[in-house]
Amino acid sequence: MPDFLLELFSEEIPARMQAKAAADLKKLVTDGLVEAGLTYASAGAFSTPRRLTLTVEGLTSDSPDVTEERKGPRTDAPEKALDGFLRATGLTKDQLEIRDDKKGQTYFARIVKPGRPAEDILATLIPATIRAFPWPKSMRWGAGSLRWVRPLHSILCILSDENGASVVPFDVDGLAAGDTTEGHRFMAPGRFTVTSFDDYAAKLKRARVLLSSEDRADHIWHDATNMAFAAGLEVVDDKGLLAEVAGLVEYPVVLMGEIGTEFLDLPPEVLQTSMKEHQKFFSIKNPKTGRIERFITVANRETADHGATILAGNGKVLAARLSDAKFFWENDLRIAKADMSDWTRALENVTFHNRLGTQAARIDRIAALARDLAPAVGADPEKAEAAARIAKADLSSEMVYEFPELQGLMGRYYAEAAGYPSDVAVACQEHYSPLGPSDDVPTAPVSVAVALADKLDTLTGFWAIAEKPTGSKDPYALRRAALGVIRLVLVNGLRLNLDRYIDAQLVRSEAALHDALGGRATEELLAEIAEHGVFGAAFHAVRDRLDDLHDAFLELADRVPDASDDLLRFIHDRLKVHLREEGIRHDVIDACLAMPGSDDLALLVNRATALAGFLASDDGENLVQGYKRAANILSQAEEKDGVEYRFGADAKFAETDEEKALFAALATAESAVAPALEADDFPAAMAAMADLRAPIDAFFETVQVNAENEILRRNRLNLLHEITASCAKIADLSRIEG
């Protein structure tokens, strides 16, 4: 079985595109081989800045013959039908078979498609793959029609076996496939011939090219950490930068340089970000002080002076970059120490969204909500509001304008310099978190209050203007904001009725949309919501208390409840995804969502976790079956009789011991379940419900519910209602599947 080797050699491929391009090349070619009837033992794809490489081992030399059977017209069909069938199959009439069919005798054709050599298949497949390659961006050059990420210089395409190697013959836009390639652009120019993948990889290594991006990354990290260790320092871990730099060089040469002493007092994050973003340098820190003191750069060649000239040039560019950063830092500090509110006022001229107003207006809404949330999360309301008012001030700073990824972090530095309490300063940094499912969740009360307020304001604002995620589109990252709310609540064990805060913030967002809502009525409505926590009651109280209300205010009665319910459903949907990843079934979550208080996410999750554990036991599973049996019998009887059996069963009508035992068990369970639910002790409530399993089983085994005696029948149907009502106190078990 031959092995296949393909190399597409071009100008430099952007580092961010290399890994996906290698994976795409492997998938497109191997899928094409399989579709053509070839099999293979293994395949591997590699990338460097100048080449994409694919190796396929153990490829079958020919595709198998394929026999296809086609049914034709009946033997008594018109001659034209037979002629058309013969043209389609390429056969003659005497090559057809006649078989008996349900409708009479019918012609059948057996068409044998002979296999093709692997070389012929590849000669067709590879050019088609090259022409249709899915680069994110591509270009044309010269007079040809081929599009590639950068100008394509050569194609190496060979099949090799024990008898040697042969070129797969084809060309693409005048580029003929061959058996040669090039090494390193500077250290090993010139072409050379290869005969197999092993020969190819070995000759590339001698020509100063490391084919594997993983090998290049390992080489960079090994040399960088050794250099730093020798100086008593350590490399700041950055896997993303390591992968990117490994895609910038074919032969990595690691060099360590000095940072000018005048820049060493800059915040380490500023140094790290500036060096990473502008020059792809690794930061080297002093583990004792945390200060960034040196940098690592990776060259693409060895030099006679061992990199001294390269380091000198990089040092000059770095000094210029860091001079800018130092100027920004010192200027920003001067403003922060004087008055950070200057930055906040500047945000009055920065639009957050054309329908939701400026960043400054949004800060006012977040500050108001953070103050409302503070008592519920254990934070000081004054600190929560103060933190919310300065949390986004650094967006006006020169440093964040230059390095947007430092927003929040610089806010913390500036707030500390301005003399704010440490928890207020920390909230400036942490209020953006969590940014994703693996990001750390703030736990400091002030940070939690501002982070929740920020995310809830984002959600309610876009719900107020009906800009909700659709399908895979989520331009405002609202799914991430909802997950952030969920994780903040659950990680911190917060008992919040989200409805109240959603309603209040929807009213504030509506006020941003309608100038007429900015008056006394809106303020009183917000005060009523804060006191009573229910929009409907608050709205009616204000409407009844005030005269001459504007139509825009009256319309809130329709808009806010609908938007609030829809947003809560959206948050519940994200919670389902979050809990499913933790192993809790969707039907368990639905059973708990149907219960009162579903806007209290911590309560909801505690209930769902306890129910999932309960259902995993035999008692839980069998109790659900008993509940469903009782519910089915009850609903059928009510539908048949046209009445409801919901008025309480009487134990004096119980005839059998099993019936009496069930009455007693229900009473015992009720006395245990009620206080457990009052204390939100769901495991205890479900443990008490588990004791019902045996009495319910015994009841159904021995008692005929639809007795001939009408009094007994009604009493037993009412008893079934007591079973379903008792079970329904822990969750809506009708939603449990199976």
Image (cartoon, rainbow, N blue to C red):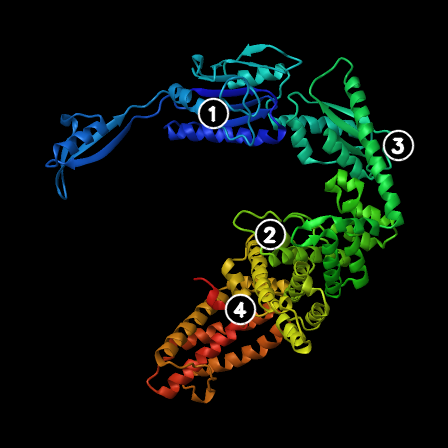
Residue drawn where x is 69% and y is 27% of the image: 220
Q: Nearer the viewer, mark 4 or mark 1?
A: 1
Kindly identify which residue carries mark 2.
479
Residue under label 1:
131
Q: In which quarter of the image is residue 632?
A: bottom left
Residue 494 visible within the image: no
- Say how many tags the image has: 4
Residue assigned mark 4: 731
The CA span between labels 3 and 2 is 44 Å
Left or right, 191 with respect to 375, comes to left
Identify the mark nearer the N-term, 3 or 2. 3
Q: What residue type is labelled 3?
A: Glu
Q: In this view, does 183 lie above or below 56?
A: above
Residue 303 visible within the image: yes
Instruction: State if disc 2 and disc 3 touch (CB < 8 Å).
Output: no
Tags 3 and 4 in contact by the CB under 8 Å rule? no
Name the spot of residue 284 as percent of width and height, x first.
79, 32
| Precedes in sequence: disc 1 or disc 3 | 1
For disc 3, the marked residue is: 262
- Disc on the earlier residue, 4 or 1: 1
Above or below: residue 351 compared with residue 275: below
Q: Do the residues labelled 1 and 3 touch (CB within 8 Å)?
A: no
- Judging from the image, what secondary structure is the residue with disc 1 in? helix
